Image (spheres, rainbow, N blue to C red):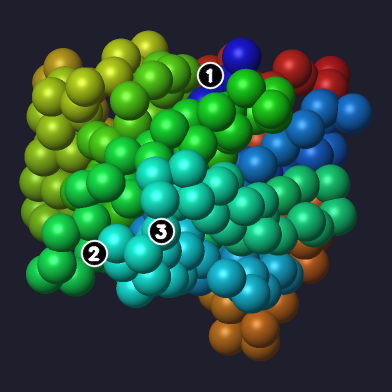
Amino acid sequence: MATTIAVSGKGGSGKTTLAAMTTRLLLERTDKKSVIVVDADPNACLGLTLGVEPEITVADIREEIRAKGAGNTGMDKVRSVEYGIQQAITEAKGFDLLTMGRPEGPSCYCAVNNMLRKFMDQLDSQYDFVIIDNEAGMEHLSRRTTNNVDLLCIVAEQNTIGTLTAQRIFDLSKKLPIAVKKTGIIWNRSENDKEIDGIDNFGHIPYDKAVFDASMQDKTVFDLANDCPAFSMARKILEDIGILVSSS
């Protein structure tokens, strides 16, 4: 069964960058382990951060199947979903990427969504690690039907809105239909830790101009120097949590 790492936070908090850094660190430390990265944020940009551009999303699959309507039998729909998800998995160097795409429209997608959940859950058994970049509302996690989340990292900045959002995400995680084994906050673009009652503090990642420059120059997380401050601190945090085995 896969180790599932979920990253959540409001837009602009740096959660996508952390998810990308986590992917790179796992690839560097877990030789011969299979990794799939799921971009579950409607504002999908994880692929760009990793240097991968998906050709099709899960949302595209859903729309295509629904557009075919009642003309398809139940078995045809099941096969279409299974085939579509396999087509939506983009193979990259050392990892796979699956992009969820835009949220549902006003029409009913219940039947298609149920099939999508089934096959998405089955994917977990095919990988050693699953990294999920979630929106703050964690819609993707709330719709999982099987498999627990081993680690939920809430990424926030140390301001009033960031702190409030982190608390709301933590409260929401307690209402998910699946178990989250370990949850904590990572303070991004911060020089120190901040305690919130009842929530584990995983650590802080400092502002790093190299990360900002990379995003402005269309570079990827793999272009960052191994010893740049943000990447070094992300590595230490994941070592302290136990996701990475220390190289020292």
Category of crowding for the residue at label 3, using alpha-carbon neighbours closer than 10 angstroms: few (below 14), some (14–19), many (at least 20) = few
Rendered image: mark on residue 72: 3
Foreground label between 2 and 1? 2
The first of marks 2 and 1 along the sequence is: 2
Image height check: is 214 above or below 141?
below
Camera-side residue of 82 and 158: 82
Q: Is residue 101 left or right of residue 208?
A: left
Q: Identity of the amino acid at label 1? A: Ile
Quarter occupied by residue 182? top left
The first of marks 3 and 2 along the sequence is: 3
Mark 2 vs mark 1, CA separation in Å: 35 Å
Category of crowding for the residue at label 2, using alpha-carbon neighbours closer than 10 angstroms: few (below 14), some (14–19), many (at least 20) = few
Identify the residue at image location x=47%, y=64%. 61
Identify the residue at image location x=43%, y=32%. 118
Image height check: is 228 above or below 125?
below
Category of crowding for the residue at label 1, using alpha-carbon neighbours closer than 10 angstroms: few (below 14), some (14–19), many (at least 20) = some
Secondary structure beneath label 1 = helix
Residue receiving disc 2: 104
Residue 129, position as x, y percentages in the image: 65, 29
Quarter occupied by residue 171? top left
Asked if residue 155 shows in the view, the reply is: no
Mark 3 vs mark 1, CA separation in Å: 47 Å
Mark 3 vs mark 2, CA separation in Å: 21 Å
Q: Do the CB atoms of the residues marked 3 and 2 lie less than 8 Å apart?
A: no
Rendered image: mark on residue 241: 1
Rendered image: mark on residue 46: none
Q: Is residue 95 left or right of residue 178?
A: right
Foreground label between 3 and 2? 3
Instruction: Report the quarter where the N terminus lies.
Output: top right
Identify the residue at image location x=55%, y=47%. 79
Camera-side residue of 104 and 226: 104
Residue 73, position as x, y percentages in the image: 40, 51
